[in-house]
Image (cartoon, coloured by chain):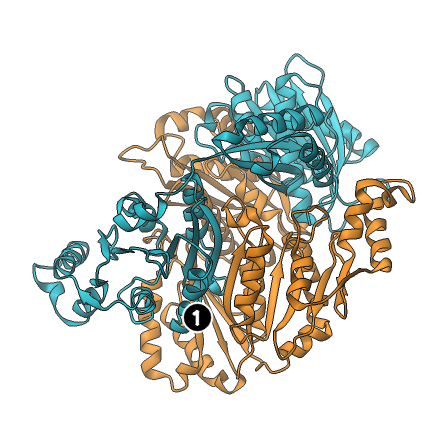
Chain colours: A orange, B cyan
Amino acid sequence: MSVRAGILVTGTEVLTGRVTDLNGPWVSTRLLALGVDVAHITVCGDRPADLMAQLRFLADQRLDLIVTTGGLGPTADDLTVATVAEFCGLELSVDTELEAHIAEIIRRWQRLPAGAAESGPTRAGIRKQALVPEGAQSIPPTGTAPGVAIAGSAERPAILVLPGPPRELQTMWADALQTAAVTAALSARTELRQETIRAYGLSEAELAESLRTAQHQISGFDGLEITTCLRHGEVEMVTRFAADHAPAYTELAELIRTGHSRQVFSTDGATIDDQVATALAGRRIATAESCTGGMIAARLTDRSGSSAYVVGGVVSYANEAKTGLLDVPAALIAEHGAVSEQVASAMAEGALRRLDADTAVSTTGVAGPGGGTDLKPVGMVCFGVAIAGRPTVTVTRRFPGDRAAVRALATTAAMHLIADGVAGTAAGERPAADSAPRT
Amino acid sequence: MSVRAGILVTGTEVLTGRVTDLNGPWVSTRLLALGVDVAHITVCGDRPADLMAQLRFLADQRLDLIVTTGGLGPTADDLTVATVAEFCGLELSVDTELEAHIAEIIRRWQRLPAGAAESGPTRAGIRKQALVPEGAQSIPPTGTAPGVAIAGSAERPAILVLPGPPRELQTMWADALQTAAVTAALSARTELRQETIRAYGLSEAELAESLRTAQHQISGFDGLEITTCLRHGEVEMVTRFAADHAPAYTELAELIRTGHSRQVFSTDGATIDDQVATALAGRRIATAESCTGGMIAARLTDRSGSSAYVVGGVVSYANEAKTGLLDVPAALIAEHGAVSEQVASAMAEGALRRLDADTAVSTTGVAGPGGGTDLKPVGMVCFGVAIAGRPTVTVTRRFPGDRAAVRALATTAAMHLIADGVAGTAAGERPAADSAPRT
């Protein structure tokens, strides 16, 4: 018997499609990793009747746990705690210690003098956020909103109430799992292992073909729960299994690894960003970006500690910037066009020299929607990888999709070129990831 | 009486968080634009019992229309049409004309000779996709999967069954709206207007206070459906209302605009990105980024046509890059530190000169998690805005949150500084948007 959970996402901005929900998917993957079977996700606006209806629906689905997200703010349209309390038939009362704690957080954030948050509209908001259903356990706020955990009963599942801002929710997750209500709800679960294999330049159809082969060859294959997902040209294959199916997974991993050795780049959970960070330890990288417009530099510096190996970069959107900051000869641009391997090479080498780096990557391409020609269509991107002491390598790829897709695919491609280049593999050896988008 | 709808998204890959659902938000915004009130979105995996439970739940919510997405493929785990037919108590039968049409599409795609798709496993898949519930109207496929529209009855809402691939679904939408079942379901709808007000540096609590005032002062306020949302320091207030409540909205907009004149930057739906693009027409902008690491350049170039006004930029992560590419004197960095208004000013002016631009923005700050000091804590960011012929303006802000939040907030702050700077407003006149994050 596996433990079943449902996720209830609140927020009119999510229901109306103005904001992409990050919490449902995040909580779902976390629960899955814990061996919990997520059966339903529901989304409702800030209306008590709809929220109540969804709580009732979820409680009727033989679930062990309901996780709600959002609706914990100080304003009147945030009504999750009150509605959940009503649903459970529990009275609300102010937790004065919690109230003081929230007031202190707000005072510090707004740099108010002591006592200033304890009056007026702010006070009313704080008081509202400090309301806890009787018998429930509050979870310390990581923003201003505390979470709430309510134990399950014969009539209904345990309910875990979490805040809406993804950062607050994620920071609170570890504490939430420690509450008595959640611990009890999850006690019946089977521990599952989860392993991830990542490949670049492999189509989902090719992977599906390998999985069909595996199904025939590997005994215990049916005990492996496999999901595959294509993102920015990378295929991610996640497998969940109980301990007694570990040998089957080992066989599967071996089959995938040997069958697609040129495409599989990670079998230990590491992302390409992890691998690039490791590869760049002790090096100095510079970027020279045209069509990606700073996205590669932004991605490299996304990681804390990246200042140890990122020197900087140039976004050379206009040709003058390529010439002025990267020493790309104007004649080279005139002869081959800005989107050319020759210019990509000169950009990478210019970045290497100008930024005194030992590794550099460049992009120049047609992101679209305009600017494409027969010879240089929308989606065509030229890359250069310059590594001190080695000949500069260039590659041309053509990516499908709109402007945003082309830029995202080109940024990921650059990450793979950096990893391959530093590892000494000839860049571009892997097949291009320009296969048809996922359907 | 407004028309109410629910959306049922199917797919284990969505439920488990591996794939971001694009269909729920897309269908929701389309329905809203048609004046339909979307009350619920539910997500389920490829399990008939869970799908049936969600159909039953939605049918119980006094809805006029249920839209399902996904589960229309040729394989066994795609079971939406069969489950919907069972839910409605309708027999399925093969539409032979549709079957021939799908076979022809597949034959063309796979470039098979005539008749080749009409046998073996492909044939079985085609036959499955051509199953239509009795009395239902099929919608011609835009991929291989036809849609299905089933008229509502006294017992249940109309049900519109659409395919999962976003492009197929979106292409089919216009035809789906023309079906008798959907036309009838939507016949009672009221056209609603939607207006958006955006403010920067305004807390949700302040806005909530103004809304409480408005509620007392404005007659017809209760006919306005208002949702507010805080993102990256901006508050977005969206109001939907029927035509007879337009005067109430006009009063509300005036009250918000005058009450928060320094913070409200848009009342016509334009985003800060739209305003920056408009402000930069005919200008040439350059960026000089340290802690934002290319995010401002990436955001500016996200928009097609931005090459008309974006010259490029420098990501000067290391001090040598600030000195070498932006002419920031090493002595200035030694004296004031890399994170200082003096260096921000020199960076912006350096970018202006080196990239031959007339507008430049710079950032230098402590993104964290490490590197903070008492004087220059994590979250502190210095900005410079250089505009040719005017004195360079500098601002220092302190943003809450982790590395990703600080970088995102700093990028949005830079967009506002550009808009203000070009508009001639003294940059930094608006209060800092470092108030508490949304809960």
* Image location (x, y in percent) of residue A96: 86, 58
Q: Residue furthest top?
A: B389
**Quadrant of image for the C terminus of chain A:** bottom left
Which residue occupies the foreground of this view, B53 or B74? B53
Identity of the residue furthest to the right in this view: A114
Q: Is residue A88 visible?
A: yes
Q: Residue at x 74, y 56 (%)?
A: A142
- Across and down, in percent, residue B345 comes to 72, 25
Residue B353 in view, yes or no = no
Q: Residue at x 51, y 60 (%)?
A: A42
Give residue B280's quadrant in the image: top right
Figure quadrant of residue A282? bottom right
Q: Is residue A428 above or below residue A396?
A: below
Residue at image mark 1: B50
Question: Compared to A371, does B376 lie above or below?
Answer: below
Secondary structure at badge 1 equals helix
Residue B253 relative to residue A438: left or right: right
Chain letter belonging to callout 1? B
The structure residue drawn at horizontal position 69% and vertical position 36%, both measured from the top left corner, is: B207
Relative to the observer, which residue lies in front, B60 or A260? Answer: B60
Q: Mark 1: few, some, or many residues within 10 Å (few <14, many ≥20)?
A: some
**x then y, percent, for residue A78:** 66, 50
In this picture, residue A318 sits left or right of residue A378: right
Q: Is residue B329 above or below residue A2?
A: above
Query: Which amino acid type corresponds to the residue marked 1 in the rendered image?
Result: Asp
